[in-house]
Image (cartoon, helix red, strand yellow):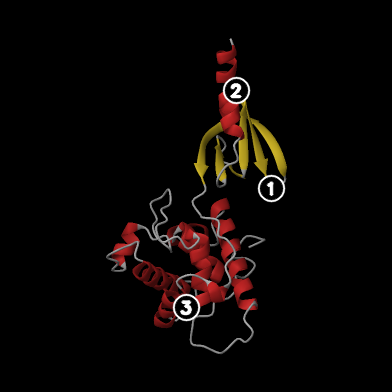
Amino acid sequence: MRVKYLAHLLPLFLAAVPQARAEYFVLQNSQRLHVSGYQLLGDKYRLQLNGGFVELSADTVVSIEPEDVFTAAPVEAAKAPFRDLIEGAAARYGVDADLITSVIGAESNFDPKAVSRRNARGLMQLLPQTAARLGVQHIFDPRENIDAGTHYLRDLLVLYKNDLALTLAAYNAGPLRVHQYGRVPPFAETQSYVRRVRNAYAKRKSGLPDSKPSTTIAPTASSGNTAPSGL
């Protein structure tokens, strides 16, 4: 009887263990809930959201998906890893080094071996097909990954006329999705990604004692009818 009782409690114990990273709950009505923790209690899930907790029936949940985007730890621009490689790529492609650093922080948290659920790889989370198109031979090599990622970022900045929100949305969700919606796509992951990179970039720029004129591409904020409110 005691063994049966412990076996019954085991799933609850495992569900109560804090999640290593955020998850998305996909519901039957196509809604995606971004949660930081959850428990399965009988036939209901108890979800931890930013605003507190909510319970919903387990039969309304289609799937539970891990968050693809790595949560970046704060990194001061002057102390960011791979700074020499970043500045080299910035000079080659005319992209602000602090923007590249902010993208790397959100994409991989500076882990050169990072691999996402969608098979994006390396510091700037390049898909193998994108890396191949940009001439990458060794996708996990920091120098090649940063060079190709910066090249792609420059192409997007040119395509979207330096609109930073659209550029970041396309980097995360793909240009086809941005074209489909004509704005930042209404995906929680993409909207969160755009906010985090823009916030990190703004903090890095505000931390610089002097802003020297340069020939690098200077991204601009989106117009009000381009990005969702809050981005």
Name which of mark 3 and mark 1 comes first in the sequence. 1
* Left or right position of 155 against 45: left
Tell me: residue 84, above or below residue 176.
below
Q: Nearer the viewer, residue 166 or 98?
A: 98
The span from disc 3 to disc 1 (Cα, nearest Å) is: 34 Å
Where does label 3 land, which residue?
95
At label 2, which amino acid type do we have?
A: Leu
Question: Which residue is pictured at 52% across the width and 88% down the height?
Answer: 214
Name which of mark 2 and mark 3 comes first in the sequence. 2
Tell me: residue 196, above or below residue 86.
above
Place of residue 202 in the rendered image (x, y in percent of width and height, measured from the top left): 62, 72
Place of residue 124 in the rendered image (x, y in percent of width and height, measured from the top left): 43, 64
Question: Which residue is pictured at 31% across the width and 59% down the height?
Answer: 129
Place of residue 181 in the rendered image (x, y in percent of width and height, measured from the top left): 52, 58
Q: For residue 138, what is the image quadrant?
A: bottom left
**Are the residues at dot 3 and dot 1 in contact (C-beta closer than 8 Å)?**
no
| Secondary structure beneath label 1 | loop
Question: Which residue is pictured at 48% across the width and 70% down the height?
Answer: 81
Q: Nearer the viewer, mark 2 or mark 1?
A: 2
Question: Which residue is pictured at 72% across the width and 46% down the height?
Answer: 51
Circle 2 Cα neighbour tier, 10 Å, few/some/many (<14 / 14–19 / ≥20)? few
| Secondary structure beneath label 3 | loop
At label 3, which amino acid type do we have?
A: Val
Q: Nearer the viewer, mark 2 or mark 3?
A: 2
Most extreme residue toward the top is 1
Tell me: residue 158, above or below residue 191.
below
Where does label 2 land, which residue?
9
Tell me: residue 143, above or below residue 46.
below
Where does label 1 land, which residue?
50
